[in-house]
Image (cartoon, rainbow, N blue to C red):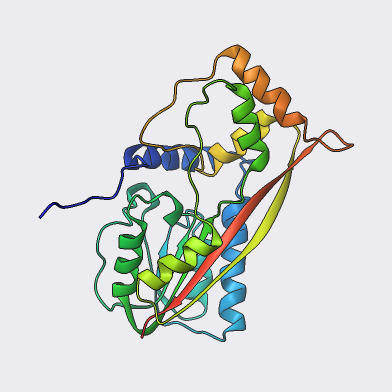
Amino acid sequence: METRFPPRIFSRPRRMAGLRRALVRQSQRDAARYIMDDMVEDVLERLEFMRLSPTRVLVIGDWTGTLALSLRGNGAKVEETDVRQLDEEAPLPSGSYDLIVSLASLERVNDLPGALLHLRAALARDGILIASLIGAGSLPNLRRAMIAAEPDRPAPRMHPLVDNAAASALLQRALFRRQVVDSRTLEVAFSSLDRLVSDLRDQGLTSNLSTQAPPLSRTALERARTAFLEGAGKQGRVTEAFEILTLTGWKD
């Protein structure tokens, strides 16, 4: 029988290299971290709303350490993954956690159904998974600028991302008893394309496609910069959108 493997869309070595560079950039005073800060705040608000006080927690992807610190302050025993060695496609200890939180991590996994199955298996009975990821509605101005940069034959430079309907189907496929998927939009204003790219690098969110596109030529880069600023408002700033999907699943 032929064994089918998931397509290799993403390069894990490139992703790890980008995260290591981001951790170095975070030592700078003005380094951007608003994506992770927003996700951490949202998870804490959800736990408070659900009146959930987990005792054993696994936190994946939070390179700020803020979420684990807050949960430990509430009495939880928290394990954290080293973001420099993330491998969401590897199995975890079975039935070990009553809460698993994954932040800005699952959107760049080749075998996303398999990763969700591993996370479900690692939950204790009645355990909960909360996974926040960057959704398909993100960065429309950047996408438009990349197409304008190479109008005849654009190279693949941006990730395919999961939308709300696909996320719900994935949770069902992973056999979670109940599933909730919701989205929100985080808007950030940028004075230039270069500022946006710098922010993405600060947060380890640049491309880690398995096929690396060649650098943009100087002419193509100028076209991209011009196209990006076509979306600017009266103050000369472009409001870019980050769609944040939050997947919540309960294990029976």
Query: Considering depth in this image, is 118 or 74 the residue closer to the camera?
Result: 118
Q: How many marks?
A: 0
Q: Which image quarter: residue 95?
A: bottom left
Looking at the image, which residue is at 34% across and 61% down?
113
125 horizontally vs 34: left or right: left
Looking at the image, which residue is at 67% across and 33% down?
195
In the rendered image of this protein, does residue 139 appear above or below residue 40?
above
Residue 92, image x and y in percent?
A: 26, 66
Residue 159, image x and y in percent?
A: 48, 42
Residue 59, image x and y in percent?
A: 42, 65
Looking at the image, which residue is at 44% across and 67% down?
169
In the rendered image of this protein, does residue 167 appear above or below residue 98?
above
In the rendered image of this protein, does residue 143 appear above or below residue 187?
above
Q: Residue furthest front?
A: 1
Q: Which image quarter: residue 105?
A: bottom left
Looking at the image, which residue is at 67% across and 57% down?
185
Residue 246, image x and y in percent?
A: 54, 66
220 horizontally vs 212: left or right: right
